[in-house]
Amino acid sequence: MKIAVTGASGLVGQALVRQWSGTHHSIVAIGRRPPGPDGVIMPGTPPRFAAWDPGAGTLDPRALEGVDAVVHLAGESLAARRWDAALKARVRASRVLGTQLVARAISALPVRPRVLVCASAIGYYGNRGDEILTEDSAPGVGFLPDTCRAWEAAADAARDAGIRVVHVRIGIVLARTGGALAKMLPPFRMGAGGTLGSGRQWMSWISLADLVQVFDRALHDDTLDGPLNAVAPTPVTNAVFSRALAAAVHRPALCRVPATVLRLILGAERADALLLSSTRVMPARLQAAGHPFQHEDVATALREILR
C-alpha cells in the first residue's frame, strides 16, 4: 500500500513508519518540514515528503495522488506547558483544522484512498469515576471531550465521500523513549515516585507495540469504522500503576503527591484533566473482533519496555 502519514516525526508516527517501511509499504510523510536523519527516515526506504500548513489550509493535492490510505496523527501537544486560552485554542485548531484539511483534500481526489485513520483520544470520555466506558459511551464534559468531539467530526467530509474513517481513541501510551512514561521515569528512578492524588483514578493504557498493531488493524480491517478504543483490556488505578512502575525500576513507591500540589504546580484544569481524571476504558470493538494484545498486564508491560 501507499500510505500518507501526518505527524510522522512523532512518537507514534515514527513507530508506524518503521513498521510499515519494513513490510514493503511506501510512505508519504506529510509535515511542516522534512523529517531529520534521526527521525522517521528509514535506511533504504526513505519516505517521500510533502509539505502542508494546516493553519493556512495548504496541502498540495498532488502529494496524495495514488495514496491507498491516510493516517492522520498531527496535533499540538497538550502537556507542554500550563493551559491558557491561547494554548487551548491552538490545541483545538491543530486537530480540527488539520483533520478538515486532510478530509477535504482526499475527498476531492479523482481516485480516493479507501481509508482514513485519524488519531483521537480517550479524553473524549472525560472524568467518569469507576464507570466502564466503551466506544458506545457518551462523551464527557469539558475541554478535552469537546475538543475530541470536534476533532472526530472534522473528518465528516471524507466519510460523506464514501471513505472508511476510523477514529483511534488512544489511551496513555507506554514507551521507553517518549510520551507520558518518559516523563514519569525520572522521579521513579530516584525513588521519589508514588501515587497522584487519591490514587483511585483509573488509567487506561496501551504499550506502543500494541498501539502500532491497532493502527495496522484499523488500516487493513474493512469491518472497522468509527471510534476504536486503543487501550489494553486491563485498565488500572493510579496506585496500582505506580507500584508496577516502581517495581519495574527497582525502587519503592512511597511518595504521594496531593491533588492540591499538582493543581498548584500544573494549573487546576490541566492537572485535573491529565493526571487526576478517572477514565476506565475498554477496547470493546477490538475485543469483539478477536484482536490480540501483546501486553495485557501493566506490570509485565513495564518490565519489558524498561528492561
Image (tube, rainbow, N blue to C red):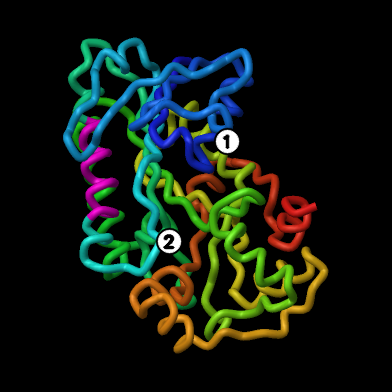
Does the stretch in magenta take in 94? yes
Does the stretch in magenta take in 70? no
Mark drawn on residue 15: 1
Q: Earlier in the sequence, mark 1 or mark 2?
A: 1
Distance (Cα) linking label 1 and label 2: 20 Å
**Element under label 2?**
loop
- Location of residue 213 (image quadrant): top right
Left/right of residue 33 with respect to residue 99 in the rendered view: right
**Mark 2: few, some, or many residues within 10 Å (few <14, many ≥20)?**
few
**Answer yes or no: do the residues labelled 1 and 2 have beta carbons within 8 Å?**
no
The picture places residue 248, in percent across and down from the top left corner, at 78, 64
x 58%, y 51%: residue: 178
Left/right of residue 213 with respect to residue 91 in the rendered view: right
Question: Residue 221 or 193: which is nearer the viewer?
Answer: 193
**Mark 1: few, some, or many residues within 10 Å (few <14, many ≥20)?**
some
Q: What range of the chain is rendered magenta?
A: 90-103
Q: Is residue 137 above or below residue 237?
A: above
Mark drawn on residue 79: 2
What's under tag 1, amino acid-wise? Ala
The picture places residue 7, in percent across and down from the top left corner, at 41, 36
The picture places residue 261, in percent across and down from the top left corner, at 48, 86
- Location of residue 48 (image quadrant): top left
The picture places residue 39, in percent across and down from the top left corner, at 54, 32
**Element under label 1?**
helix
Question: Residue 257 or 240: which is nearer the viewer?
Answer: 257
x 47%, y 51%: residue: 170
Q: Is residue 249 above or below residue 90?
A: below
What's under tag 2, amino acid-wise? Ala
Secondary structure predominantly adopted by residues drawn in magenta = helix
Left/right of residue 71 with respect to residue 245 in the rendered view: left
- Location of residue 196 (image quadrant): bottom right
Q: Nearer the viewer, mark 1 or mark 2?
A: 2
